[in-house]
Image (tube, rainbow, N blue to C red):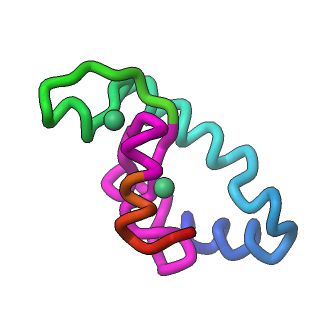
């Protein structure tokens, strides 16, 4: 069902690919994981700024919580940098 919805969203507007469903998922995830998970591993307590998809949607990832990560902006940028995005 999630997959189906994703396809629907994608066809419609590249700029709005996440839409309202994603906002709801993200809000719930942030509520459960209010701190950057990467910083937390290193013993730092930094508030979450972005919710990251471990496997990007474009590569078949889902909005499932098991595919999400709470990150601060700098950890998020670092992960994408290491992946070679941008
Ligand atoms: Zn961080
Ligand atoms: Zn990301």
**At which x and y percent is residue 76?**
43, 48
Q: Quadrant of residue 10?
A: bottom right
Position above or below: 44 against 77: above
Q: Quadrant of residue 70?
A: top left
Q: Residue at x 47, y 65 (%)?
A: 62
Tell me the quarter of the image containing the C terminus: bottom right
| Residue sitting farthest toward the right | 13
**At which x and y percent is residue 57?**
53, 70
Q: Quadrant of residue 16?
A: bottom right
In front here: 2 or 45?
45
Magenta residue span: 50-77
Report the number of discs. Answer: 0
Position above or below: 65 against 50: below
**At which x and y percent is residue 6?**
64, 68
**At which x and y percent is residue 60?**
48, 78
In front here: 75 or 32?
75
Q: Is residue 64 magenta?
A: yes
Q: Residue at x 44, y 24 (%)?
A: 31
Q: Residue at x 39, y 39 (%)?
A: 71
Q: Residue at x 62, y 48 (%)?
A: 22
Tell me the quarter of the image containing the N terminus: bottom right
Position above or below: 7 against 30: below
């Amino acid at each position: 069902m999630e997959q189906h919805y994703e396809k629907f969203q994608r066809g419609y507007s590249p700029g709005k690919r996440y839409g309202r469903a994603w906002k709801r998922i993200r809000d719930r995830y942030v509520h459960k994981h209010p701190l950057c998970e990467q910083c937390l591993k290193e013993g730092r307590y930094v508030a979450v700024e972005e919710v990251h998809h471990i496997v990007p949607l474009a590569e078949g990832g889902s909005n499932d919580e098991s595919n999400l990560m709470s990150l601060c902006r700098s950890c998020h940028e670092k992960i994408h940098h290491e992946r070679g995005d941008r």
